[in-house]
């Protein structure tokens, strides 16, 4: 019940295209869903996060869509650029209490020039 | 200052060596974390410190010994490691009441020979 399932495992998108990464969760107590971006040899960086009281959050070219009833959330990268090539991890946690992050398995995104 | 710094960047050690990893943050965060990350996998939580006290130990072998000397510093002492302990070791920090919003350092790439 603590799992977060992420897909696809890898993704190739042409420059200017839309990259879409999906995550699904089981634990309905989760109430905070961050996305992390990790470049090779670097630590993960918090990219964008959403709470279940909103269905969408946008920051620049990055948008999280959230479907509470389906227990799914997704990251959309608009106008994808080669510099977006990285591994993306979705995660979930419970804000109150002493809960840590449950990560998805990651998606390797390659944006071709 | 919104950085978490880690030293060294790379470390090669033999199975009989004793070494330490260091992490530092100056964001005033009172929660700090150690994660282990294998290639193409998500980070795995090892330890959590809150207000300089160990609050979570995810059943990590005793050859890994964490230490939090003050609110800005976190060490991970290594002794008698195995080759399978080779990984990227990540430090993260957060405000003590915002465990869900973690900021990662760049990591130490550890190779055990």
Image (spheres, helix red, strand yellow):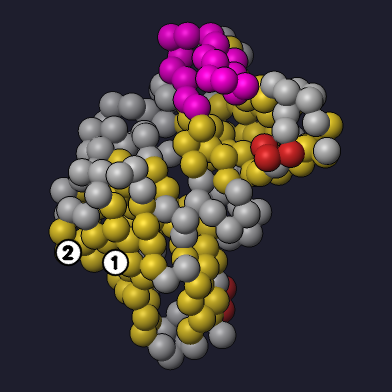
Do the residues under discs 1 and 2 have CB atoms within 8 angstroms?
yes
Image quadrant for the C terminus of chain A? top right
Q: Residues within 10 Å of mark 2 (few under 14, many from 20)?
A: few
Establish if B30 lies above or below A63: below
What secondary structure is marked by label 1?
strand
Residue B52 picture quarter:
bottom left
Residue at the spot 29% in from the left edge and 33% down from the top edge: B98
The crowd level at tag 1 (other Cα within 10 Å; few <14, some 14-19, many 20+) is: some
> Residue B68 versus residue B85: which sits nearer the camera?
B68
Does the stretch in magenta take in B25? no
**Residue B101 position within the rendered picture, expressed as x and y whole percent measured from the top left:** 37, 34
Same-chain status of marks 1 and 2: yes
Query: Is A100 drawn above or below residue A48 in the view shown?
Result: below
Residue at mark 2 = B69
Q: Residue at the spot x=78%, y=25% of the render?
A: A16
- x and y percent of residue A71 in the render? 57, 18
Mark 1 to mark 2: distance in Å?
8 Å
Height in image: A97 above or below B103?
Answer: above
Q: Residue B110: in sight, yes or no? A: yes
* Residue A32 percent across, percent down from the top left: 42, 24
Label of residue B53 in the image: none
Locate residue A4 relative to residue B108 in the image: left or right. Answer: right
Q: Position of residue B72 (x, y in %)?
A: 21, 55
Tag count: 2
Outermost residue toward the bottom? B16
Label 1: which residue?
Answer: B75
Q: Which residues are magenta?
A: A48-65
The kind of secondary structure element at disc 2 is strand
Q: Quadrant of residue A41?
A: bottom right
Which callout, 1 or 2, points at the residue further toward the start of the chain? 2
Give the chain of mark 2.
Answer: B
């Amino acid at each position: 019940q603590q799992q977060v399932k992420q897909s696809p495992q890898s993704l190739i998108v042409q420059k200017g295209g839309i990259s879409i990464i999906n995550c699904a969760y089981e634990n309905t107590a989760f109430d905070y869903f961050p996305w992390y971006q990790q470049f090779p040899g670097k630590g993960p960086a918090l990219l964008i996060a959403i709470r279940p009281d909103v269905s969408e959050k946008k920051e620049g070219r990055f948008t999280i869509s959230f479907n509470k009833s389906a227990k799914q959330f997704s990251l959309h990268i608009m106008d994808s650029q080669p510099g977006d090539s990285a591994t993306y991890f979705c995660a979930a946690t419970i804000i109150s209490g002493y809960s840590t992050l449950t990560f998805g398995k990651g998606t390797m995104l390659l944006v071709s020039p | 200052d919104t950085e978490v710094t880690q030293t060294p960047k790379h470390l090669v050690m033999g199975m009989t060596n004793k070494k330490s990893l260091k992490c530092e943050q100056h964001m005033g965060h009172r929660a700090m974390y150690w994660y282990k990350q294998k290639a193409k996998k998500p980070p795995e939580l090892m330890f959590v410190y809150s207000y300089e006290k160990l609050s979570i130990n995810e059943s990590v072998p005793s050859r890994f010994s964490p230490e939090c000397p003050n609110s800005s510093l976190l060490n991970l002492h290594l002794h008698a490691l195995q080759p399978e302990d080779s990984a990227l070791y990540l430090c993260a920090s957060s405000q003590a009441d915002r465990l869900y919003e973690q900021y990662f350092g760049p990591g130490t790439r550890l190779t055990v020979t």
